[in-house]
Image (spheres, rainbow, N blue to C red):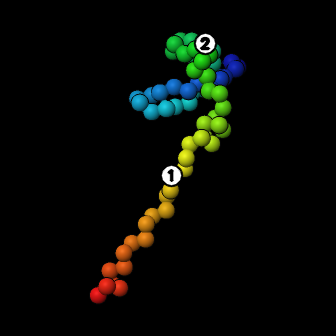
Amino acid sequence: MAELAEYDVEVNGYPATLQLSSEDAKARGLKDSDKSSSRSAAKASKPTANKAAAAPANKAAGA
């Protein structure tokens, strides 16, 4: 089985990480500079969005 490497690419304007053999990467025009340096470093640098919803206004309290 061929050894796979991770490549950081852009697909339809969105960042994506692909696992490709060197032959597949060459066929798609990717170079060694496109290889992913570290998935964990990329994940760590992304800030996590705040998913907590704002408290709804209590309509009954004002009546």
Q: Quadrant of the C terminus?
A: bottom left
Q: Quadrant of the N terminus?
A: top right
x then y, percent, for residue 19:
60, 26
Q: State left or right for residue 56 relative to residue 15.
A: left
x then y, percent, for residue 47:
55, 47
Q: State left or right for residue 37 relative to residue 16.
A: right
x then y, percent, for residue 53:
45, 64
Q: Nearer the viewer, residue 17 or 57?
A: 57
Q: Amino acid at mark 2?
A: Glu
**Sequence order check: which comes first, mark 2 or mark 1?**
2
State whether residue 29 is above or below residue 51: above
In the displayed orientation, state which residue is furthest to the left.
Answer: 63
Which residue has dot 1 on it? 49
Q: Is residue 20 visible?
A: no
State whether residue 61 is above or below residue 39: below
**Residue sitting at x 51%, y 25%:** 9
